[in-house]
Amino acid sequence: MSASLFYITFGIYLAATACYMIYLAKPLAQTGKLARWLITGGLAAHVLFTLLRYFEAGHTPITNLHESLSFFSMAVVAVFIYFERKFKIIVLGSFVTPVALLLMLVSSLFPSVISPLNPALKSKWLVIHTVVAFLGYASFAVAFGAAIIYLMQERFLKQRKISGLFQRLPSLDTLDDINYRCLTFGFPLLTVAIISGAIWAETAWGTYWSWDPKETWSLITWFVYAALLHGRLTTGWRGKKAAILAVIGFFVMLFTFLGVNLLMPGLHSYK
């Protein structure tokens, strides 16, 4: 049952992404409304899939790459819906929903079999650490989408292309504000995730920090976003510089999440 819901969710996300892309090309109110209904329905199906998976597995379904990529995708959609409703910018979905869709696609490539839970994962910290981390990651994904649009708009302005797509995208100030709001939402969550992970590590392995590849790259990710936040608050980093750093931070975060698991075996490796 949960497997069917996974692919139903994927199909709805695919349809929603297509609608957002059509809206980007031709912003009709009906298309935008349909896209919003589809992405909301997709999130509902995704939550139901996650709940069913929970009851099938007997634990929170975030213990292998199939589950964690799916959960990451769900978090991206949830955080996107929040910011899309807050700023009322439908076109943001044209740049964020493809990320959620791609995460689901990659998730489908990994085994979905439910395996016995590793003893180290049998802890209350599993939910606290991972859910907080994924919400932080999701906010960085939305910031990434806003940053890509910002860089496009900035380029259009430099080239004096102020018609067509330029007129369908939000203003630079609005995009910069979204970037900042996502950063101030995601960075504290990432900080809590790292701290809770250290506490969990001490109970599981007897040490708060072991410089495991995942720990090291999580710290690198934290420093990237800390530098961006510090720059914005103290030296006035805004606009293009902030957008570029948001893009860099997103790819560093992706490597921390997925690349480390696949390329750097360690205590946190799982497939």
Image (spheres, rainbow, N blue to C red):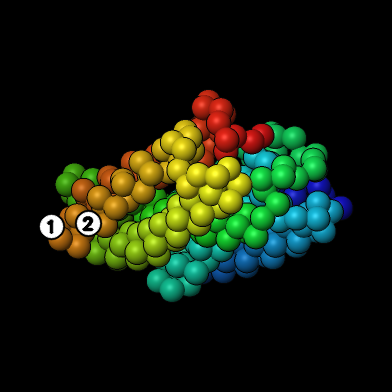
Residue depicted at x 27% and y 45%: 244
Instruction: Please indicate, yes or no, whether residue 54 appears anywhere in the rendered image.
Output: yes
Picture coordinates of residue 51 (x, y %)? Answer: 76, 61
The amino acid sitting under disc 1 is: Thr
Residue depicted at x 43% and y 74%: 86
Q: Along the line of sight, which residue is nearer the eye, 207 or 59? A: 207
In this picture, residue 93 sits left or right of residue 170:
right
Picture coordinates of residue 99 (x, y %)? Answer: 52, 47
Pointer 2 and pointer 1: residues touching (CB < 8 Å)? yes
Picture coordinates of residue 26 (x, y %)? Answer: 47, 57
Q: Is residue 123 above or below residue 83?
A: above
Q: Quadrant of residue 58?
A: bottom right
The amino acid sitting under disc 2 is: His
Residue identified by numbered label 2: 230
Residue identified by numbered label 1: 235
The C terminus sits in image quarter: top right
On residue 222, which mark appears? Answer: none
Q: Is residue 34 above or below residue 165?
A: below
In this picture, residue 17 sits left or right of residue 155:
right
What kind of element bears circle 1? loop
Q: Residues within 10 Å of mark 1 (few under 14, many from 20)?
A: few
Q: Along the line of sight, which residue is nearer the eye, 63 or 240? A: 63
Q: Is residue 106 above or below residue 93?
A: above
**Marker count (numbered):** 2
As drawn, the residue found furthest toward the left would be: 235
Residue depicted at x 82% and y 59%: 55
